[in-house]
Image (spheres, rainbow, N blue to C red):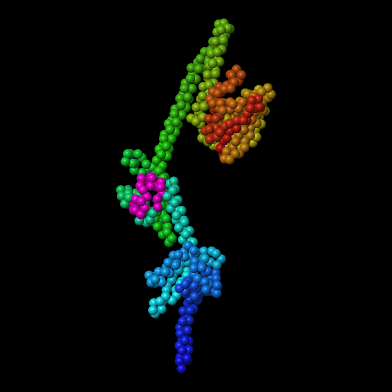
Amino acid sequence: MPAPRNKKTSSVYDIRLQPFRDAVEYSAIGIATVGLDGSWITLNEALCNLLGYTQKELLGRTFQDVTYPDDLNADLEKVRQMLAGELTHYHMEKRYIHKDGHIIWIILSVSLVRDKEREPLYFVSQIQDITQRKKVADELATSAGLLKEFIKNTPAAIAMCDRDMNYLHVSDRWLLAYGVDRDSIIGHSHYDLFPHQSERWNKIYERVLEGKPEGCAEDELPPCPDGTPVWFNWELLPWHNAKGEVGGLIQFNQNVTQQVLAKQELERLIQDLERSNSELEQFAYVASHDMQEPLRAVAGCAEILKSRFGNQLGESADELISHIVDGASRMQGLINDLLQISQVSSQASPFETVDANEACRAALLNLDALIKKSAASIELTNLPDVMGDRTQISQIFQNLISNALKYRQEEAPQVTIKATKVNNCWEFAVTDNGIGIAPEFHHKIFGIFQRLHTRNDYPGTGIGLALCKKIIERHSGEIWLKSSLGKGATFYFTLPQN
């Protein structure tokens, strides 16, 4: 009987096909058979999960229903070519629309099944989700594009080479620095472009390609053909590929010729200025010292004339002798002050830790007679240790306190001295209740020989505050004041902390 045989044959046939059915059903990628009109005939669970539909929802629908509109024409063209016998299978990247509306990127592989007469029956499709891979690839492409734009437009001269020193990317500034265009550089070997490069640079490139960064600031390179010197800041860094291997190097170059020339000129000017200042200080010291002797002779002779012949030569002669004595005395005062100014740097002592209380008390001791005569009140708060020249710091206090006693009002002078820590220095304040200084003269009083009053009103050479300023500047500090006419003054100055 044919029936039993057919039944047995059918059973054997089913057993042999079962592994293939299982392979399709449990495959990790989507597998489907599709009718010639695009309708789903069979599809596995992986494809249903990929699209978010059940098998029941997809059966009876077409692949056109879930294909992203922009990709449909390309897909249909491939189908047409297969049906026309122009293709036996095709692969393409395309997009599907998930049930919830988001886009899925896939790789689609399609084959056409034909009968014995070569007539088309149906399509077999394999669908693999590449959404995540596509996202990573897009991100990498974006990053690569950004990197390329960054290198191209950065204001520094940058070039990127592979292990064979072929140029991969260069910045516009690099092209400008070397006077070449992008087409003649990209893909070409550095050694071909610069065949006469020194062996020193070849060795440097070898070390960098071994993974050792190199760099140099203000490296003097061979001069230009016209003899113009050239200096560069440069740095060479190895870059690594995905395997962690050195893939090539990145060059960072900056032409600093103008900066170096400017620095050299500045250093020359500073040396000239220091030499000039030294010569001026030496001249002032020598001139002042040599002027002392004839002045002492003039002053001595004038004193002898005054003592021996006073009231004997007549009133006019006595007045002339007094002018000579007074002039010689004032000239000696000016010379002594000039000597002090010249010695701020030339005769200075090394910096050391100085107790500002002791430096201020030494100044007060020198001014003891003037303090008692003016019945002055001096209030000294606890002052800090500072770094500086002990004698010169004492001079600052002495000159400022002396001015406070000199430019007094009718009441007894009152002077307070205190210090406050500000950042990395100490800010001192010397405050008095004297006649004050109008704001329009604040900038003037620190100049040498600058006076706001006549010698008859207030004696002096007008050099005290200039001396303070020079000493404080030697200590990298500043001096300024706050004052108004008739309301006293506060002089501020800064000294480095210990």
Q: In this view, does 211 lie above or below 71?
A: above
Residue depicted at x 44% and y 48%: 154
Residue 435: percent from left, percent from top:
64, 24
Quadrant of the snapshot with the C terminus? top right
Look at the image and tell me whether residue 234 can be seen. no
The question of residue 209 being in magenta is answered with no
Q: In which quarter of the image is residue 421?
A: top right
Closest to the observer, 283 or 129: 129
Residue depicted at x 41% and y 78%: 115
Residue 363: percent from left, percent from top:
60, 29
Q: In this view, does 475 lie above or below 440?
A: below
Left or right, 382 with reference to 51: right
Closest to the observer, 211 or 177: 177
What's drawn in magenta, residue-wise? Answer: 169-191
Residue 397: percent from left, percent from top:
59, 30
Residue depicted at x 64% and y 25%: 485
Q: Is residue 42 above or below residue 403?
A: below
Q: How many labels does the image show?
A: 0
